Image (cartoon, rainbow, N blue to C red):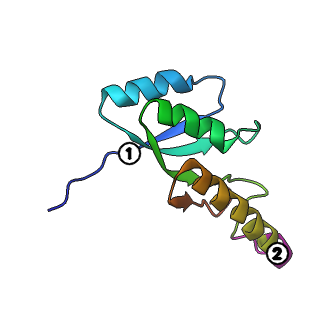
Amino acid sequence: MSRLRLVSAMGWGFDSWNEDDQLRMLAEFGIHQVQIFRNIEKSLRAADIRRKLDQRQMQAVSLHAYFGPGWDPSATDEAERRRVVEALGGEVDYARDLGGTLLVVHPGAGVI
């Protein structure tokens, strides 16, 4: 039986969270792989995030794509849906630049 990997989601670029503190705490618990989600209101370079991860021997395994209004790949309007899917291509590139192999997409834009 294969071993279960413990991976933690980790926010980046939020004023209420300190990335260095988060990374240190995760490492103390033996967690060295993270899923990154970013503050949509800040311009964050993948290279800067990856540099901090590398300094702590951490690895981003996935990126949560931006989600919410303007990022819904299930939009009923075809032109909007195509625009979002094209924009998600940029998120795929960002995930690769982080060193990740997965992009997590949240369709629905919060609509229940």
Quarter where residue 37 is shown: top right
Residue that label 1 marks: 7
Location of the C terminus by quadrant is bottom right
Tell me: 79 left or right of 24.
Answer: right
Identified at 66% across, 32% down, the residue is: 13
- Where residue 106 sits in the image (x, y, percent)? 60, 59
79 drawn magenta? yes
Above or below 98: residue 51: above
Distance (Cα) linking label 1 and label 2: 35 Å
Q: In this rendering, which labeled residue sits more in front, label 1 or label 2?
A: 1
Identified at 37% across, 39% down, the residue is: 32
Tag 1: residue type?
A: Val
Identified at 34% across, 37% down, the residue is: 31
- Where residue 105 sits in the image (x, y, percent)? 60, 61
Asked if residue 70 shows in the view, the reply is: yes
Which contiguous range is marked in magenta?
74-80
Q: Which numbered disc covers residue 77?
A: 2
Tag 2: residue type?
A: Asp
Tell me: 44 left or right of 112.
Answer: right
Tell me: 72 left or right of 98.
Answer: right
